[in-house]
Image (spheres, rainbow, N blue to C red):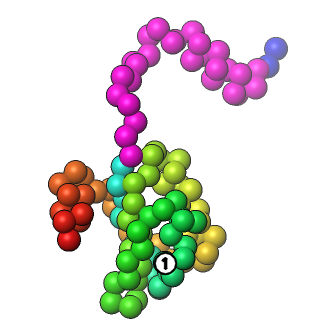
Amino acid sequence: MTFHPTARYHAYRFAMKDKLPKTTMKKSPITYEIKVEGLVDDRWSEWFGGVTITHIDNTETLLTGELLDQAALHGVLERIRDLGLTLVSVRRLDGQEVLRKTKD
């Protein structure tokens, strides 16, 4: 009898549920700074999940905002791809960098 890989995975998770580590931390948003080539109009902010859009030297755009998890980050990256934009960098900001940015 052959099981579908997903069924095997769920059976494994069920059997190991008491042996696997449990995370007790609540997920809190993570601030990311995503740089792309070209200029993205501010109107796209909501479509990108409410990020702040900043232009750098009229050649690049910086998208900065809080994303709940990796799935949300990948969603923004997919939208960048869908618009045909060239990704320059993705940076996760720590708490001190976020505080400095909000003061600026």
Q: Is residue 25 above or below residue 60?
A: above
Residue 46 occupies quadrant: bottom right
Q: Residues within 10 Å of mark 1 (few under 14, many from 20)?
A: few
Q: Residue at x 24, y 63 (%)?
A: 102
* Quadrant of the image containing the C terminus: bottom left
Q: Is residue 86 above or below residue 7?
A: below
- Of residue 4 and residue 68, the one placed in the foreground of this image is 68
Q: Is residue 23 magenta?
A: yes
SS of the residue at dot 1? helix
Residue with the most extreme bottom position: 58
Q: How many marks?
A: 1
Q: Is residue 33 above or below residue 85?
A: above
Q: Mark 1 = which residue? A: 42
Q: Residue at x 59, y 12 (%)?
A: 14
- Specify start and end residues of the magenta stretch as a single range: 3-29
Q: Residue at x 38, y 24 (%)?
A: 23
Disc 1 residue type (three-letter): Asp
